[in-house]
Amino acid sequence: MTRRVVIVDDHGIFRAGLRSELGDAVEVIGEAHDVESAVEAVTEQKPEVVLLDVHLPGGTGGGGAEVVRACRSLQEQTRFLAISVSDEASDVVSVIRAGARGYVTKTISTADLVDAVEQVAQGDAVFSPRLAGFVLDAFGTTGAAEDVRDEELDRLSAREVEVMRLIARGYTYRELAGELFISIKTVETHVSRVLRKLQLSSRHELTRWAEQRRIV
């Protein structure tokens, strides 16, 4: 059976390359480049599987996880497979917690990706080998990731999670600004929002919070 797929990634070259690589193995019925266009494409096309990048512009800053949450009512017929260059635990946990059925990195072979699409379409969970451990750590060994939520972490956007993780690793504001290509003032704004949303008062408390969730 040829699965109907929507490709979501903010890089047109990657979307074109992925479409070419997949060839006739799947039927690509739509593409999107940001949160808004992704929600629109998924809602209109109702694909069986969405190949979803984790870091997307637009929306409220929630990236791929925001797309999954916005399309939650469709998840009985449409399933999400995250495909990203990132293998950070926080990215994996965030998008799986939102409702995605799998997460693979962009180093995956074409044959393995086609197989992953089929497995996800059938309702199975699929992860690159190294990433499966993050999911087991976050959700235990029951396999019921979609039933377990961290309401505090869900308050943060994808960018805020990224800032939180780097702060917890000991980055200075200047180092963090250079790492994320943003201004120090923007870093200060993100950190302030993270502390407020998590009801924490210091970097020390933030580091301990992140370590307890194994997302540093």
Image (cartoon, rainbow, N blue to C red):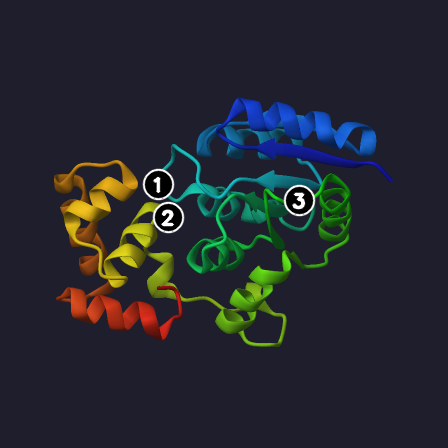
Callout 2–callout 1 Cβ contact below 8 Å:
yes
Crowd class of label 3 (few under 14; some 14 to 19; many from 20; radius 10 Å): many
User: Could you tell me the amino acid type at mark 1?
Assistant: Gly
Q: Is residue 41 above or below residue 113?
A: above
| In contact (CB < 8 Å): disc 3 and disc 2 | no
Question: Residue, x 63% and y 56% (percent of image)?
Answer: 128
> Which of 212/157 is in front?
212
**Spatial separation of the CA atoms under disc 2 and disc 1:** 6 Å
Instruction: Say which residue label 1 marks.
Output: 61
What kind of residue is marked 3?
Answer: Thr
- The tag earlier along the polypeptide, 2 or 1, is 1
Q: Find the distance from the CA under tag 3 to the CA under tag 1.
A: 22 Å
Q: Is residue 14 above or below residue 112?
A: above
Q: Which residue is mark 2?
A: 158
For image coordinates 52% across by 46% down, the residue present is 68
Residue at the extreme right of the image, as rendered: 1
What residue is at 52 percent from the left and 66 percent from the top? 134
Question: Which numbered circle lies on residue 206?
Answer: none
Residue where numbered disc 3 is placed? 78
Q: Which is more N-terminal, label 1 or label 3?
A: 1
Give the quadrant of the N terminus: top right
| Residue 13 in the image, given as x and y percentages of width and height | 56, 23
Q: In what quadrant of the picture does the C terminus appear?
A: bottom left
Residue 161, given in percent of the width and then of the height, sits at 33, 54
Q: Residue at x 26, y 73 (%)?
A: 208
The mark that comes first in sequence, 3 or 2, is 3
**Label 2 neighbourhood size at 10 Å, few (<14), some (14-19), many (20+)?**
many
Question: Residue 93: x, y in percent?
Answer: 48, 60
User: Cα distance, mark 3 to mark 2?
Assistant: 22 Å
> Mark 1 falls on what kind of element?
loop
